[in-house]
Amino acid sequence: MRTSSRVTRVTSPSRTGPGVSASSTSGTVRRRGGAGTLPGTAAGDDIEKRAARDDAAAARHLAAARDRDIADLGVEVDSNRSAINALGEQTRERFDAVDRRFDALERKVDDGFIEMRGKFDATAAGLDRIVTLLEERGDRR
């Protein structure tokens, strides 16, 4: 736990109260107490400067960590988007292949029906010929 004094800015000296002193030259307010040093002394200022440097270093560290996290998240989003796009392409290719197979099957079925229709027509013509021959034979007797 840090025991150094914190320095805050005030806009007017009337904001000071018990336990707080205002500096008329700097416009800063220093809380009394701390690590056994008197506010305004060189040792007290050094502690405050060190605390400010520590706080700034911690803030820079947290900001850098946040930036890395955001960059990592962007990489993950990009990789997921690439994977989803690849799955979409793969699915489209498979549907195209199924469409081609159905088209080929439809052609085979149509060709088969045409072939069978021709055979049925030939059979019907043969049966007509047989009927005609039988009628001719019956007329001769």
Image (cartoon, rainbow, N blue to C red):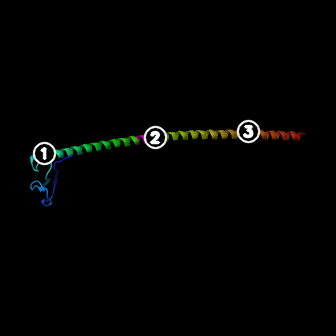
Q: Position of residue 129 (x, y in %)?
A: 79, 39
Q: Quadrant of the C terminus?
A: top right
For mark 2, give the secondary structure: helix
In the picture of the structure, the residue carrying the numbered disc 2 is 87
Dot 3 falls on a residue whose secondary structure is: helix
85 magenta-colored: yes
- Name the amino acid type tagged 1: Asp
Instruction: Tell me the SS state at disc 1.
Output: helix
- Is 43 on the left or on the right of 141, as rendered? left
Which residue: 16% across, 53% down? Answer: 8
Q: Nearer the viewer, mark 3 or mark 1?
A: 1
For label 1, the residue is 46
Side (left or right) of 83 relative to 120:
left
Q: Residue type at mark 3?
A: Ala
Label 3 – label 1 distance at C-alpha: 113 Å
Give the foreground label among 2 and 3.
2
Residue beneath the point at 55% across and 39% down:
100
Q: Main secondary structure of the magenta part?
A: helix
